[in-house]
């Protein structure tokens, strides 16, 4: 007896697949419910009258003028054809997960390793994708020679300033015209109720104006690149996002070339949903800034269950809807799209499942939720121009 597949959309798109399958000879067919693992492609039946949502995320996002991206692990892009195929089909934007960071580009002082980053730029060109450059200045993943030189005093403050200016100039010029936007400074503020600029070697030796200087140096190297600041735990209105709002307001007033604010969007189901994300992004938009969700994933303590699946759908959808409600929100990027290669399990013990596809590249309810939000008709802000 063939299988009759009925798809019943449950709350929060936690679709449950019922199948009436072959049963013991002569016995009535059994109706069994199985947790949703919707198949890829149009084999998933749609409720009559609903628009087809089973299109790649980049295709659905294009109607909104929105770039839909993913972080890309270059080792995996080279070694896993299925990963590679999904990156090209699903996304209109790519961010190097590590290949464009300072330690990767200049592991030895004065010796640049452009290979993996150039490969991503070429991959993006071939696939009609735009590149989001990540990241020029960050207190993490700076090269060892830099940290050691500053620590032992062999690199003076004046020399560090020259080194930073040279790094930004060299990298931005190398990718000039090939990288749409840069996270010029990443994670500049501390966390908590009284955020201050992180006590990094950049603040210590270049002073608080290092951020404005970095933006100016990047702009001089590529006047057409959009220059962002980027951080985590700033998706809702809180002291840290307000610190960025005040900094952005000051930089814009000083006519420093700041063009956008990146909200990383690393969510965790144990913490409250950033439900006021639209109001948060709106205040940056009112400054004339572009906004973007740059590293979205939604982790939880394993094992998964339908409540966690539903919470993940709601979390991804909250951020995507906040972006669509913001006229200059130009990009929504997930920090990896498959649980097969997520950074989360290695950093948060016992947690995982943070991406929209499972370890077999099968769409999870979170993926279906993103499709459905993007498939929603008319969008007054659809001329984002990504
Ligand atoms: O490349 C080396 C490899 O040669 C070595 O054998 C291996 C074991 O030591 O380490 C490899 O480097 C690792 C690198 O990822 C590449 O895989 C580093 O140890 C590891 O620390 C690094 O983790 C990255 C992390 O940033 C570092 O803070 C993650 O992949 C990356 O997803 C994560 O991304 C950051 C964003 O850049 C900024 N926002 C937060 C986000 C998550 O932390």
Image (cartoon, helix red, strand yellow):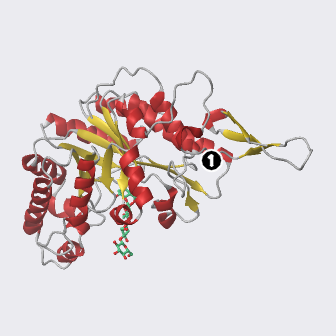
Residues 333 and 234: in front is 333
Indicate which quadrant contains ligand 1: bottom left
Residues 109 and 51: in front is 51
Q: Is residue 30 above or below residue 283?
A: below
* Residue 60 lies in quadrant: top left
| Residue 353 rendering spot, x and y as whole percentages | 55, 55
* Left or right: where 115 falls relative to 9: left
Structural crowding at the residue carrying mark 1, measured as other residues with C-alpha within 10 Å and reported as few (<14), some (14–19) or many (≥20)? some
| Residue 105 rendering spot, x and y as whole percentages | 21, 66
Q: Residue furthest right?
A: 26
The N terminus - image quarter: top right
* Residue 273 seen in render: no
| Residue 204 rendering spot, x and y as whole percentages | 20, 63
Residues 331 and 232: in front is 331
* Left or right: where 157 falls relative to 294: left
The C terminus - image quarter: top left
Distance from mark 1 CB to nearest ligand 1 atom below 8 Å: no
At x 26% / y 59%, what residue is drawn?
138
The total number of labels drawn is 1
Q: Secondary structure at mark 1?
A: loop
Q: Is residue 283 above or below residue 81?
A: above
* Left or right: where 266 falls relative to 187: right
Residues 379 and 52: in front is 52
* Left or right: where 329 falls relative to 204: right
* Residue 324 seen in render: yes
Q: Which residue is mark 1?
A: 37
At x 31% / y 35%, what residue is drawn?
330
At x 16% / y 54%, what residue is drawn?
210
| Residue 90 rendering spot, x and y as whole percentages | 40, 44
At x 47% / y 25%, what residue is drawn?
376
């Amino acid at each position: 007896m063939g299988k009759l597949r009925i798809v019943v959309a449950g709350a929060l798109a936690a679709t449950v697949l019922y199948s009436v399958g072959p049963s013991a000879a002569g016995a009535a067919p059994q109706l069994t419910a199985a947790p949703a693992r919707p198949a890829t492609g149009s084999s998933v039946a749609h409720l009559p009258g609903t628009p087809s949502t089973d299109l790649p995320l980049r295709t659905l996002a294009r109607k909104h003028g929105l770039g839909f991206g993913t972080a890309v692990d270059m080792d995996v892009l080279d070694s896993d054809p299925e990963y590679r195929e999904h990156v090209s089909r699903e996304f209109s934007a790519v961010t190097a997960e590590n290949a464009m960071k300072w330690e990767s580009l200049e592991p030895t002082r004065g010796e640049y390793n452009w290979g993996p980053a150039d490969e991503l730029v070429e991959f993006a060109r071939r696939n009609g994708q735009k590149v989001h450059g990540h990241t020029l200045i960050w207190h993490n993943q700076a090269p060892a020679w830099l940290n050691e030189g500053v620590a032992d005093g062999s690199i003076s403050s004046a020399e560090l300033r020259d080194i930073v200016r040279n790094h930004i100039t060299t990298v931005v010029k190398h990718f000039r015209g090939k990288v749409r936007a840069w996270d010029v400074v990443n994670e500049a503020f501390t966390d908590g109720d009284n955020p201050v600029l992180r006590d990094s070697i950049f603040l210590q030796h270049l002073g608080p104006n290092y951020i404005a200087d970095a933006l100016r140096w990047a702009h001089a190297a590529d006047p057409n690149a959009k220059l962002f600041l980027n951080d985590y735990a700033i998706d809702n209105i809180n002291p840290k996002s307000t610190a960025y709002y005040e900094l952005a307001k000051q930089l814009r007033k000083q006519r420093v070339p700041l063009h956008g604010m990146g909200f990383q969007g690393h969510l965790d189901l144990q913490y409250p949903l950033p439900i006021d994300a639209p109001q948060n992004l709106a205040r940056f938009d009112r400054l004339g800034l572009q906004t973007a969700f740059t590293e979205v994933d939604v982790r939880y303590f394993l094992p998964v269950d339908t409540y966690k699946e539903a919470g993940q759908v709601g979390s991804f959808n909250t951020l995507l809807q906040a972006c669509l409600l913001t006229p200059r929100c130009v990009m929504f990027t997930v920090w990896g799209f498959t649980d097969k290669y997520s950074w989360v399990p290695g950093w948060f013990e016992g947690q995982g499942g943070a991406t929209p596809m499972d370890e077999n590249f099968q769409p999870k309810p979170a993926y279906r939720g993103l499709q459905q939000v993007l498939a929603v008709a008319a969008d007054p802000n659809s001329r984002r121009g990504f």
